[in-house]
Image (cartoon, grey):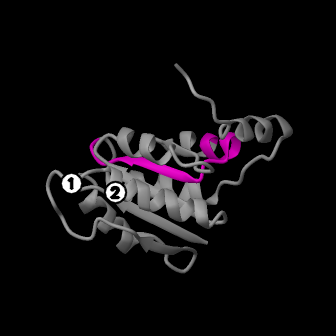
Amino acid sequence: MDVYIGSDYRGFEKKNQLLKSLPATDYNIIDVGAYSYHEGDDFNDPAIAVARNVRKDRDSKGILICDSAHGVTMQANRFKGVRAAHCENEESAILAREHDDANVLCLSAHFLDEETMKKIILTFLETKFSNLERRVRRINRLDEREDYD
């Protein structure tokens, strides 16, 4: 499975640590940036890169890391077909996958250490969607478009 990973400057160091420690034999980890540390860079760029790749490759997953994980989650969720979930522990990762078929995992560099991130990532990647009718119905509704005033 292809796994696209991206971060802004706040997640840059932890992303690079994870690239060295994630099992490459099980997953094809693809770094989509940032490729160098630039203090104050925008979280939008890696979130857009991950979301575009996950939307194009429906069998893939994405991982995003920024300071709080809020910005990358909001940006990624603007893409039709992307279901980004901010997870802070293994249980939330299980629920995001089983209940909501999340395909992008968003992690906080501020609140999580590398070892905890690794556990959450592996849980996220190994957990399957439950595929219950009510969950499929709810997920399909996520991409409904409507203009709100």
Instruction: Name the secondary structure under disc 2.
Output: helix
Q: Can you tell which quarter of the image residue 140 is in?
A: top right
- Residue under pointer 1: 41
- The residue carrying mark 2 is 45
* 145 vs 46, nearest the viewer: 145
Q: Which residues are magenta?
A: 95-110
User: Which residue is at the front of the view, 124 or 100?
Assistant: 100
The residue under the point 27% across, 43% down is 110
Residue 136: image x %, image y %?
78, 42
Q: Amino acid at mark 2?
A: Asp
Instruction: List x then y, in percent, for residue 10.
Output: 23, 52
Can residue 105 be found in the magenta stretch?
A: yes
Q: In the image, 72: left or right of 25?
A: left
Residue at 74% in and 34% down: 138
Q: Residue at image x 46%, y 57%?
A: 63
Q: Where the N terminus falls, by quadrant?
A: bottom right
Give percent across and percent down for residue 68: 32, 40
Furthest toward the right, the residue is 133
Q: Which mark is residue 7?
A: none
Q: Residues within 10 Å of mark 1 (few under 14, many from 20)?
A: few
In this rendering, does residue 88 appear at all? no
Quick check: 9 left or right of 90? left
Kindly indicate the quadrant of the structure image that contains residue 98: top right
Q: Position of residue 126 (x, y in %)?
A: 63, 59
Asked whether disc 1 touches disc 2, contact meaning CB atoms under 8 Å apart, the reply is: yes
Residue type at mark 1? Asp
Q: Is residue 28 left or right of residue 11?
A: right
Q: Looking at the image, can residue 42 be seen?
A: yes
The span from disc 1 to disc 2 (Cα, nearest Å) is 9 Å
> Is residue 65 found inside the magenta-colored segment of the image?
no
Q: Is residue 76 above or below residue 35?
A: above
Judge left or right: residue 113 versus residue 83.
Answer: left
